[in-house]
Image: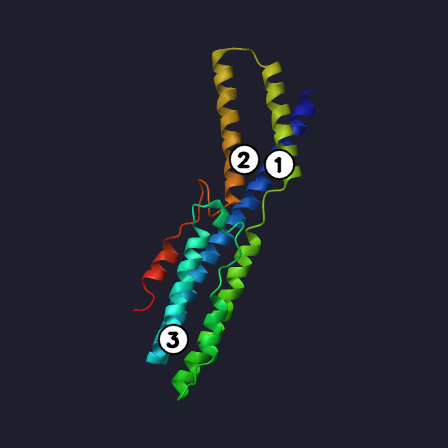
Amino acid sequence: MKLGMGLIGTMTAILLGLLIASAKSFYDSQRKEVTDVSAKVVLLDRALAIYGPETKETREVLKRAANRVLQAIWSQDDAANSSTAAPPAGGEMLYEKIELLSPQNDTQRSMRTEALSLAIDLGKTRWLMFEQANSSVSLPLLVVLVFWLTTKFCSFGLLSPRTPVVVATLGLCALSVSAAVFLMVEMYNPFRGVVQVSSAPFRSALANLGK
């Protein structure tokens, strides 16, 4: 029996470690994409500013689109949350306005090309974030993990003396494992819940647009 419980304990530890590593990798990728989008939004605005005053309206479109993205991703309303809502409109209009620019010199031609490239990259990253928002922890693996943990702790309770120290120790261990499972599930929802990706980089980028 001890051998069986030891095997279940080892398998549970391996599975829990793999699931937490996968959740952390997903969370980190979402955080990196937010930072990447924030930087590219500012770079696009700077490129349009360097192009000349002709891009004033285009920069306004960019600012409105960025503000809509901010509200869609970090909205407290689940119906508008990024896990269910598609990227808001505005990207296509922005691209069209950049495409319609008529550069008069080498600097403007260079900035127009750079702006188009940044606009395309922003669109790709935003849709990638939207598609990844549908990812979640594997339900069968989570069920197996909970079953193994339940079996393991039941075996501890059967084999251990019922003293206050043992009961308190088992309770703390169960709380620790439950917290690990909770954090794992939360990291698969990086824009809501307890463990959120910070909106600070995007808000900072938005504050610098149009300057």
Q: Which residue is drawn at 38% across and 65% down?
A: 63
Q: Mark 1 points at which residue?
A: 142
- Label 1 secondary element: helix
Q: Residue 95: image x %, image y %?
A: 48, 73
Find residue 74 and name its label. Answer: none
Which-is-in-front pick, marks 3 and 2?
Answer: 3
Answer whether labels 3 and 2 touch (C-beta < 8 Å).
Answer: no
Percent position (x, y) of residue 97?
Answer: 45, 76
Percent coordinates x, y for residue 174 in the rendering: 53, 25
Q: Nearer the viewer, residue 50 or 86?
A: 86
Crowdedness of circle 1 by 10 Å Cα count: few (<14), some, many (20+)?
A: some
Question: Where is residue 208, by image quadrant?
Answer: bottom left
Location of residue 37 in the rendering, given as x and y in whole percent from the top left corner: 45, 62
Q: Can residue 81 be spotted in the picture?
A: no
| Amino acid identity at mark 2 | Val
Q: Which amino acid does label 1 sit on?
A: Leu
Q: Is residue 134 left or right of residue 203?
A: right
Q: Is mark 3 on a helix, strand or loop?
A: helix
What sort of colour scheme is used for the picture?
Answer: rainbow
> In which quadrant will I find the N terminus?
top right
Please give the name of the residue rendered at 59% of the width and 16% of the height, measured from the top-left corner.
157
| Residue 48: mark | 3
Q: Are marks 1 and 3 in contact (CB under 8 Å)?
A: no
C-alpha span from label 3 to label 2: 46 Å
User: Which of label 1 and label 3 is nearer to you?
Assistant: 3
- Does residue 168 lie above or below 134 as drawn? above
Asked if residue 122 lies left or right of residue 45, the reply is right
